[in-house]
């Protein structure tokens, strides 16, 4: 089968690799009908050291189950399913606590040990706990938004949950990528009163406004902090969704939170130490977040997607075939595209 293989920074190829197959009795094989490129894929695209074996990339997908292992009970051949970016057994203590990304038997797709889904097919470990069988067929109009539930919509929602967004609250979203835009959707859905988007790309800002953003801050650093305080009566916001992962974005997130506020961080941190720890301490700012347990959020978010109440699939502004994936990486890296959908 064909798949996307990254050999190092900037070196993405479409190659023939061994077919996805059942390795464990709890596995399933899914034929990929839609996958996508994630903003987090751009970190190795820019920094990965070259190696001879490469990594099959991709951790967001939907598709049709083609085969199941002998111990798979809940997922059936022919099911149309969502594949969350992390696999999990659904039975361990942390899965029962709705924290599937901490599953004691789980892991992440496209990390080298388990091949990714920017491919014609993918092996899914722990299929019963990982895959979510959809109650609908492959409606073309719904496919982008359904695909978003494998990562970005669930991740934006996770940021909002950890930032304690609620009715009447003032919210800021740091980052205008696909996750940040889905964070705007989540904040609107959770009935925030004011939603400030921190970003500077015109196409993304326009989409953020469509999703419910009430204010835009294009400044960075101290100027951004000052501007957010101006927009909030000098106090800052109750809830901050940090959707980038850089030191400056986290520093800004903490400094725009009002005393007693909360920051939900879902941008993958690019440094080990968190900035602005003293301001966070003295302002009693709660900081939470991490890899989003998107499997836990599908039940809650899917009905709104199917009813058209939210349309997170709008973040996909380019659709490509598998052969075009290397150029899709380039386009996202150069900010020519917000998020690229792949149709193998």
Image (tube, rainbow, N blue to C red):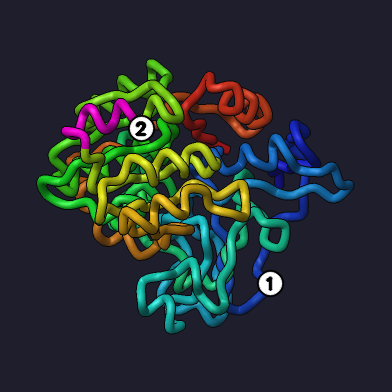
The x and y percentages for residue 167 are: 11, 49
| Residue nearest the observer in this picture, 10 or 70 | 10
Q: Position of residue 114 (x, y in %)?
A: 67, 61
Which residue, as the protein is rendered here, is positioned at the far right?
52
Rendered residue at 73%/36% (across/down): 14
300 left or right, relative to 121: left
Q: Position of residue 127 (x, y in %)?
A: 51, 70
Residue visible at 54% across and 42% down in the picture: 247
What range of the chain is rendered magenta?
Answer: 225-234
- Disc sitting over residue 225 in the figure: 2
Q: Magenta stretch: residue 103 in it?
A: no
Left of 137 or right of it: where is 273? right
Task: Decide: is 272 above or below 107.
Answer: above
Residue carrying label 1: 23
Q: Nearer the viewer, mark 1 or mark 2?
A: 2
* Element at label 2: helix
Could you tell which of marks 1 and 2 lies nearer the N-terminus?
1
């Amino acid at each position: 089968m064909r798949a996307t293989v990254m050999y190092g920074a900037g070196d993405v190829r479409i190659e023939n690799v061994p077919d996805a197959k059942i390795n464990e009795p709890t596995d399933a094989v899914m034929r990929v009908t839609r996958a996508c490129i994630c903003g987090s894929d751009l970190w190795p695209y820019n920094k990965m050291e070259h190696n001879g074996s490469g990594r099959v990339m991709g951790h967001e997908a939907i598709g049709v189950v083609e085969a199941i292992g002998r111990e798979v009970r809940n997922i059936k051949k022919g099911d149309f399913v969502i594949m969350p970016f992390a696999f999990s057994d659904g039975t361990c203590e942390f899965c029962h606590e709705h924290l599937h990304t901490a599953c004691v038997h789980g892991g992440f797709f496209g990390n080298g040990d388990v091949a990714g889904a920017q491919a014609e097919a993918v092996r899914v470990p722990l299929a019963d706990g990982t895959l979510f069988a959809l109650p609908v067929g492959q409606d073309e109009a719904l496919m982008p938004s359904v695909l978003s539930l494998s990562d970005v919509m669930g991740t934006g929602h996770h940021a909002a949950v950890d930032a304690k967004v609620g009715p009447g609250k003032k919210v800021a979203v740091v980052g205008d990528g696909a996750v940040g835009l889905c964070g705007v959707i989540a904040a609107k859905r959770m009935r925030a009163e004011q939603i400030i988007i921190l970003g500077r790309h015109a196409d993304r800002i326009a989409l953020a406004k469509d999703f419910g953003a009430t204010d835009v801050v294009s400044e960075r650093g101290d100027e951004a902090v000052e501007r957010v305080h101006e927009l909030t009566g000098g106090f800052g916001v109750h809830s901050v969704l940090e959707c980038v992962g850089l030191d400056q974005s986290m520093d800004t997130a903490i400094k725009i939170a009002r005393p007693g506020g909360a920051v939900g961080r879902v941008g993958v941190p690019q440094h080990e130490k968190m900035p602005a720890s003293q301001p966070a301490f003295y302002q009693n700012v709660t900081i939470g977040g991490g890899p989003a347990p998107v499997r836990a959020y599908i039940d809650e978010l899917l009905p709104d997607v199917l009813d058209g109440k939210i349309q997170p699939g709008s973040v996909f502004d380019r659709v490509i075939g598998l052969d075009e994936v290397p150029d899709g990486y380039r386009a996202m890296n150069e900010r020519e595209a917000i998020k690229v959908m792949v149709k193998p």
